[in-house]
Image: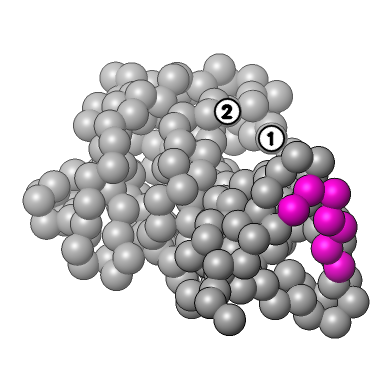
Amino acid sequence: MRTHSILFITVLCLLSSHVAEAQCDTLRHNNTWFDGWISCEETANPNDTRGNGHWIMYDFNQVYTMFEMRVWNTNAPDILDYGIQNAVIDISDDGITWTEFDTVLFPQATGDSRYDGVDAMSFDSTNARFVLITAIDNYGGACFGLSEMRIRARDLCPEDKIQWIAGNGAWDVPANWCSNRIPTQDDAVVIPAGVVVTIPFLYTAHVWTVTMEPTAALEMIGSMIAHKPE
């Protein structure tokens, strides 16, 4: 087992897009055994319902909205069978109360130094601070291992507000907004300084209110309806 903070996942970097990863410059993973996690002894799982086993827990220090998870299985040629095969994924906001999210299959790694990993699953915009991977089985080895895990994630929206998080762009693109959703008539919207947000032709944007920070701009090719009563 091993417990990780977002700052200490093997050789971890935290990018502006809030990607947790063990190699910062490429999708490829080398084939050395020491660049990863290996568990040869069962220990008590942070999720009491799992009992003793082989597990790895990631602590991202705050709650994020999570999307796709990419996994690099154990890639050292002589211990490819250490790689996790099936695993249960649990998530938590506090590291105490856990919710089972999914059971996933991690394909065996290739042993090639140009190994690119696999897109293992999506969290579908679920919010969590902790991700717990508990191995069910592996590919026949005496120990269990994983080289690297990466999750695409972003900060939660400010309380009671939907904030634009991209550069210049179109209103109707979910990825341009915090929590990956387009504002609705119930949302107080914030457009930060220095960006131009375009409401496309024939599109009607709905908001409760909209706050424009200095030097922010709305390009109104379409239309907007503010639903807050005057």
- The label on residue 27 is 1
Report the quarter where the C terminus lies: bottom right
- Whole-angstrom CA distance, mark 2 to mark 1, is 7 Å
Front-lying residue, 136 or 193: 193
Q: How many marks?
A: 2
Can residue 32 be seen in this snapshot?
Answer: yes
| Residue 204 rendering spot, x and y as whole percentages | 68, 49
Identify which amino acid the numbered label 2 is placed on.
Gly
Residue marked by disc 2: 117
| Residue 207 rendering spot, x and y as whole percentages | 59, 63
Which stretch is magenta?
Answer: 217-223
Front-lying residue, 186 or 65: 186
- Relative side of 99 to 85, left or right: left
Can residue 7 be seen in this snapshot?
Answer: no
- Relative side of 53 to 129, left or right: left
Identify which amino acid the numbered label 1 is placed on.
Leu
Q: What residue do we see at 86% from left, 68% from top? A: 217
Determine crowd level at label 2: few under 14, some 14-19, many 20+ residues with C-alpha closer than 10 A. Answer: many
- The label on residue 191 is none
Q: Is residue 59 above or below residue 212?
A: above
Q: Are marks 2 and 1 in contact (CB under 8 Å)?
A: yes
Determine crowd level at label 1: few under 14, some 14-19, many 20+ residues with C-alpha closer than 10 A. Answer: some
Q: Quadrant of residue 25?
A: top right
Q: What residue do we see at 51% from left, 22% from top? A: 109
Colour mode of the rendering: one colour
For residue 218: magenta? yes
For residue 33: magenta? no
Q: What residue do we see at 45% from left, 19% from top? A: 108
| Residue 38 rendering spot, x and y as whole percentages | 39, 43
Q: Most prominent secondary structure in the magenta stretch?
A: strand
Q: Element under label 2?
A: loop
